[in-house]
């Protein structure tokens, strides 16, 4: 099952969760659906409140306005507009 691209692992408050995302669902939407409570505000890629560290894999973002090139290079992603791009993607909200 680990080959599933839409299966993302998230870490928050030192707990790890696996989320199977729906078709157009973002990591943030998936997290809310399973009842965890990540930080967010604008939900549109501007404020960077939802920023997380990409621990493994890759996150693709649609309409990123908030994150600079440097932060992307350092491995951060915005989860409100982010979806896993490859299988085995893991993000960490604690590591920001
Ligand atoms: S909640 Fe504002 S950038 Fe994601």
Image (cartoon, rainbow, N blue to C red):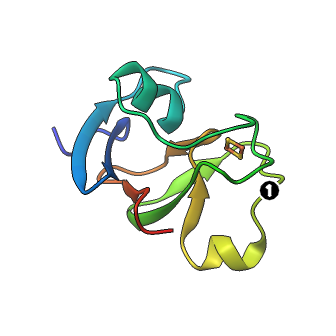
* Residue 90 figure quarter: bottom left
Nearer-the-camera pick, 65 or 87:
65
The answer to whether residue 61 of the structure is visible from this angle is yes
Q: Secondary structure at mark 1?
A: loop
Q: Residue at x 69, y 38 (%)?
A: 41
Report x, y in % for residue 18: 24, 39
Q: Quadrant of ligand 1?
A: top right
Report x, y in % for residue 75: 54, 72
Left or right: 69 as drawn, with respect to 40: right
Whether ligand 1 has any atom under 8 Å from the Cβ at mark 1 is answered as yes
Question: Height in image: 19 above or below 59?
Answer: above
Question: Height in image: 59 above or below 28?
Answer: below
Q: Residue at x 44, y 25 (%)?
A: 32
The answer to whether residue 3 of the structure is visible from this angle is no
Q: Which residue is mark 1?
A: 66
Report x, y in % for residue 26: 54, 32
Residue at the left extreme, as displayed: 1
Question: In the picture, which quadrant includes the N terminus?
Answer: top left
Q: Residue at x 56, y 23 (%)?
A: 24
Left or right: 18 as drawn, with respect to 25: left
Q: Residue at x 44, y 56 (%)?
A: 93
């Amino acid at each position: 099952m680990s080959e599933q691209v839409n299966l993302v692992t998230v870490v928050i408050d030192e707990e790890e969760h696996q989320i199977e995302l729906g078709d157009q669902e973002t990591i943030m939407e998936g997290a809310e659906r399973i009842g965890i409570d990540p930080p967010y505000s604008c939900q549109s890629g501007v404020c960077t409140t939802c920023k997380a560290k990409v621990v493994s894999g890759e996150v693709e973002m649609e309409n990123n306005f908030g994150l600079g090139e440097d932060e992307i290079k350092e491995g951060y992603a915005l989860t409100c507009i982010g979806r896993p791009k490859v299988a085995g993607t893991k993000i960490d909200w604690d590591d920001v």
